[in-house]
């Protein structure tokens, strides 16, 4: 097992050129500013999650995945636990999800974060344009506050995790 490299890893994905798909990078940039002086927090943002991120996950005490949700009500904010899911996809796969990355982390490094959470905002549009839809823009204050409070709780090492937040 690798030594812990971050108490809390924030792992965002999204494409800022696909409207609401850019919400993950937007929240990641906010988190980088908010936790800039906090050495125990690490923020990684990618256009898509790829296999090499499994090493970062394995070296983290907790992870918060950030993404949009195409199958959720536009602007809805959800925080839910995520568990390793099935077999990790092959290396030629277009996109890894949070569950697959956790599986790969366990398979390759024999390690999982103590707590793994997925924070999503329902996408209203994934059109080819920059910016966020009005539904997602309206949800940003709630999502930002939820992310900040979640990271603070993870850093405080809250032993019991309460029910996930659903808006």
Image (cartoon, rainbow, N blue to C red):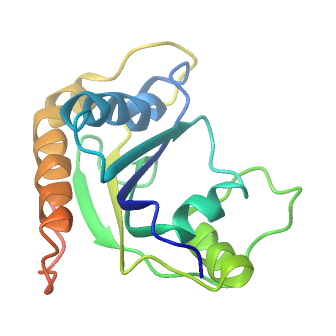
* Residue closest to the far front: 3
In the image, 69 versus 145, the foreground residue is 145
In the image, 53 versus 75, the foreground residue is 53
Q: Is residue 108 above or below residue 146?
A: below
Whether residue 87 appears in this view of the structure is no
* Residue closest to the far top: 130
Residue 154, how many percent across, how many down?
20, 66
Residue 24, how many percent across, how many down?
41, 38
Please identify the quarter of the rendering in which residue 23 is found: top left
The mark total stands at 0
In the image, 50 versus 43, the foreground residue is 43
Q: Is residue 164 above or below residue 35?
A: below
Residue 144, how many percent across, how many down?
17, 40
The residue positioned 29% from the left and 50% from the top of the image is 73
Q: In this view, does 79 lie to the left or right of 141?
A: right
Please identify the quarter of the rendering in which residue 153 is found: bottom left
Q: Is residue 21 left or right of residue 100?
A: left
Residue 163, how many percent across, how many down?
14, 80
Whether residue 52 appears in this view of the structure is yes
The residue positioned 19% from the left and 73% from the top of the image is 164
Please identify the quarter of the rendering in which residue 161 is found: bottom left
Q: Is residue 152 left or right of residue 54?
A: left
The residue positioned 22% from the left and 35% from the top of the image is 37
Q: Is residue 108 above or below residue 124?
A: below
Task: Check the picture and name the quadrant holding the C terminus.
Answer: bottom left
Task: Check the picture and name the quadrant holding the N terminus.
Answer: bottom right
The residue positioned 63% from the left and 82% from the top of the image is 106
């Amino acid at each position: 097992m690798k030594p812990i490299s971050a108490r809390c890893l924030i792992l965002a994905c999204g494409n800022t050129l696909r409207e609401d798909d850019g919400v993950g990078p937007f929240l990641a940039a906010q988190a980088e500013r908010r936790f800039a002086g906090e050495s125990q927090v690490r923020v990684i943002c990618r256009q898509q999650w790829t296999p090499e991120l499994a090493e970062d996950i394995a070296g983290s005490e907790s992870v918060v995945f950030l993404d949009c949700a195409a199958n959720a009500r536009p602007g809805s904010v959800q925080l839910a636990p995520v568990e390793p899911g099935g077999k990790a996809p092959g290396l030629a796969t277009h996109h890894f999800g949070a569950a697959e990355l956790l599986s790969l982390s366990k398979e390759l490094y024999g390690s999982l974060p103590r707590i793994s959470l997925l924070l999503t905002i329902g996408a209203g549009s994934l059109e080819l344009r920059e910016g966020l839809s009005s539904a997602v823009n309206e949800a940003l204050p709630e999502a930002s506050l939820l992310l900040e409070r979640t990271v603070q709780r993870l850093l405080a090492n809250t032993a019991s995790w309460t029910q996930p937040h659903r808006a």
